[in-house]
Image (cartoon, rainbow, N blue to C red):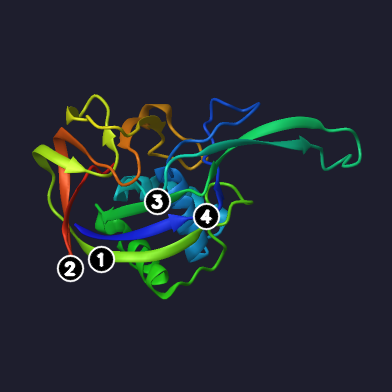
Amino acid sequence: MKGFQLIIEGNWGHFKKPETNNNPLSHDLITKTALIGLIGAVLGIEREDMKSKFPQLSEDLLYGVQLLNPVKKISWGFTSRTAISPTTEGTPKYFEFLKEPKFLVSIALKDEHSKSDFEDFKKSIKQEEAIYPPVLGWHNCPANLQWKSEGEFSEIRNGTFETKGFVLAGEHTPKDISGGFRIGFDKMPTFQNEDFWNLPDKYKNVIYPDSSHSITVEGKYYEYQSSKELEKWCLI
């Protein structure tokens, strides 16, 4: 499969967990659905057109994430007011934000149906171009995008492998997670339908090592060959 890597970072990020509406919490990592929204912004795809793009790209693209900065979360309070009466007393609301998030993201083209969007996004990242400002999940969290590498992903393989990216809980068996570093857990959305709804049965439970560390597990993986190195990734 064709693939490439980019670095996504910013001062703040918020990838909302849908079960936390009153005081929204954030996922630890950029989600697949947030990445698709970012692709839409870079390519300038209007909201109505994104209705069909979300399910299409959810199926046609695979992605993996590696932490480049540790996960740091801070709660920040805002006062919510209505547009009808903006001067009336508002209700305090707290949001959980990621501080200085930085991710290495691998993207693979699983289905040629989305080849045009895949190639256009790759070209935009290489040329440092974006039609609309990309964000880290929330409109007040601008994202910086940096080209990393281009390469090929192998067919899916099975065995013991070492990776710095996330793996799937229940599908990958840890072989060595010893050492003095943090292992994180999260439940990530991987599919959004035409109503912009993350389907509950498409969530995946992931395990990930802290930044600069790796874990060794047994299960399915892909090899990514770039001009510089060979890496092993779990992609969803």
Name which residue type carries label 4: Gly
Disc 1 to disc 2, C-alpha distance: 8 Å
User: Which residue is found at the position 81% from the left and 37% from the top?
Assistant: 81
**Image coords of residue 110 (percent x, y):** 24, 52
55 horizontally vs 139: left or right: left
Residue sticking out furthest to the right: 87
Secondary structure found at label 1: strand
Q: Nearer the viewer, mark 1 or mark 4?
A: 4
Q: Using a 10 Å C-alpha cutoff, classify the residue at mark 4 as few (fewer than 14 neighbours), some (14 to 19) or many (20 or more).
A: some
**Image coords of residue 4 (percent x, y):** 28, 61
Choose the circle earlier in sequence order: 1 or 2: 1
Disc 2 to disc 4, C-alpha distance: 27 Å
Name which residue type carries label 3: Phe
Q: Which residue is under mark 1?
A: 150
**Image coords of residue 98 (percent x, y):** 53, 42
Dividing the picture into quarters, in which one does residue 216 lie?
A: top left
User: Which residue is found at the position 30% from the left and 32% from the top?
Assistant: 180
Q: Using a 10 Å C-alpha cutoff, classify the residue at mark 3 as few (fewer than 14 neighbours), some (14 to 19) or many (20 or more).
A: many
Choose the circle earlier in sequence order: 2 or 4: 4
Q: Which residue is under mark 2?
A: 227
